[in-house]
Image (tube, grey):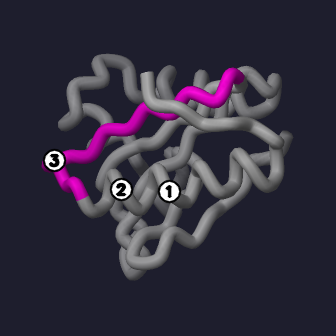
Amino acid sequence: MEPVEINAGRYYLRQLRSDDQLDDRPALTAAGVTAPSQYVARRAREWARDESYAWVIAEPRTGAMLGEVVLGTDGTIEVWTSPDDEVAERDAVAAVARFAAGALGLVVRRP
């Protein structure tokens, strides 16, 4: 499946990027990812192979990465935000859960 962007109210959910327009690698490094280029590439492969679906939780005006939410094909949702932001986490999980149920027929659960 091609990556799907989601409007999550005060946040925007989009695929990870590392291009001349937007680069999430510095935010990934700050979050503890040791190989951010490979991480971005892996997430793109997972979308293409329908293995899992990952979205950046982004600030809508700048596109800055605030965290990530990942939907597994079994309906599990994992999320992190930096700094810890309960509102961003709640809104992102709710938006992905709606997408999972409506578009993929998945019942979502937190691990």
The residue where tag 3 is placed is 84
How many neighbours does mark 3 have within 10 angstroms: few (below 14), some (14-19), or many (20 or more)? few
At x 50%, y 56%, the residue is 94
In front: label 1 or label 3: 1
At x 53%, y 32%, the residue is 109
* Disc 2 residue type (three-letter): Arg
* Disc 3 residue type (three-letter): Asp
Identify the mark nearer the N-term, 1 or 3: 3
Q: Is residue 21 above or below residue 99?
A: below
Q: Position of residue 92 (x, y in %)?
A: 45, 56
Disc number for residue 90: 2
Q: Position of residue 76 (x, y in %)?
A: 56, 27
At x 22%, y 34%, the residue is 31
SS under mark 1: helix
The residue where tag 1 is placed is 94
| Magenta-highlighted residues | 74-86
Asked if the residues shown at circle 1 and circle 2 are in contact, with their CB atoms under 8 angstroms apart, the answer is: yes
Residue sitting farthest toward the left: 83
**Dividing the image into 4 quarters, which one contains the C terminus?**
top left
